[in-house]
Amino acid sequence: MPAIQVKNLCKTYVRRPFLGVKVEKPVLTGIDLTLQSGKVLGLVGESGCGKSTLCKVLLGIESITSGKVEIFGENIAGLSGSSWKELRRKMQVIYQDPYASLDPRFSVYQLLSEPLQIHGLYPNKSERKKYLHELLAAVQLDPVILDRYPHEFSGGQRQRIAIARALALKPQILIADEPVSALDVSVQAQILNLLKTIQQQRNLSVLFVTHDFAVARFLCDEIAVMQQGKIVEQGPAEQIFEHPQHSYTQKLLSAVPSVEEAL
């Protein structure tokens, strides 16, 4: 069973100016997308094509205008609050900007403990602290940082903390929305290697959103190419790179710099 199955998904924003005629803006049009269990699917496209909106729909932050989204076979349309709470244990998100995604008022201990408290996990303080140590070790951070605050860390360290928080509920699906684009190039490589290791160790299903084909090729099993709110091509990563079928995919790939060109 696919981790995520999207069928003919449409998302339209409606704006109603005061005493004016309502204005509709289609953002997602007829999206068909499949994330297989235990695989990494790269969602690639230019800025503004609708990638982040699709992530918000999958996470229940935005409503569906029409179409269907199934998570492990369950249709998310019309889910109750309690059902969404249970689903979010299975599906977590890593945001693009680690400076904005961590509450500066919370220590690392509080940041990692919050999802556990919400879902009633590890109520015993000693057991919780032991589990938090394990989480930090999984993202290659020293447990001594538990009492420190986000402003005391570099961008790469903050993103590791954000990854640890996403892993806290032992999810089966990770949605990573451009998780390395705000980081220095050298740090990007470290975070990508970490994500690849975690995905393989935990057999996670990952939707990895990026505008960088080189990053997608390194990490992803399959790639879906999005243009102006539509999926124009999806297939195995190597097939997309070696034999792109759609003209837009070919255009994006031709813009990727090569070592030979750099020399």
Image (cartoon, grey):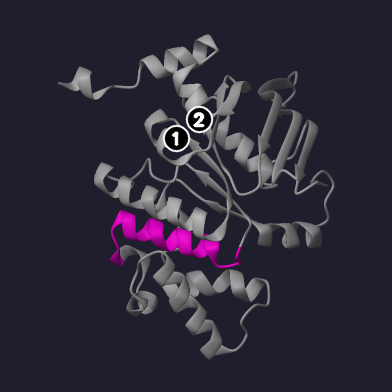
The residue located at (35%, 69%) in the rendering is 141
Residue 56 falls within the magenta-colored stretch: no
User: Is residue 180 shown above or below 83?
Assistant: above
Residue 158 falls within the magenta-colored stretch: yes
Compared across the picture, whether 176 is left or right of 152 comes to right
- Residue contact between numbered discs 1 and 2, judged by CB atoms under 8 Å: yes
Span of residues in magenta: 152-170
User: Where's residue 86, x and y in %?
Assistant: 74, 62
- Give the residue type at disc 1: Ala
**Cα gap from disc 1 to disc 2, whole angstroms:** 8 Å
The residue located at (68%, 77%) in the rendering is 120
| Residue that label 2 marks | 237
Tell me the tag on residue 216: 1
Q: Nearer the viewer, mark 1 or mark 2?
A: 2
Compared across the picture, whether 200 is left or right of 20 comes to left
User: Is residue 133 shown above or below 252?
Assistant: below
Q: Mark 1, residues whose alpha carbon is within 10 Å: few (<14), some, or many (≥20)?
A: many
User: Is residue 178 shown above or below 159?
Assistant: above
Q: Is 36 or 65 nearer to us in this picture? A: 36
Q: Is residue 51 visible?
A: yes
Placement of the C terminus among the 4 image quadrants: top left
Q: Magenta segment, principal secondary structure?
A: helix
Q: Is residue 106 visible?
A: no
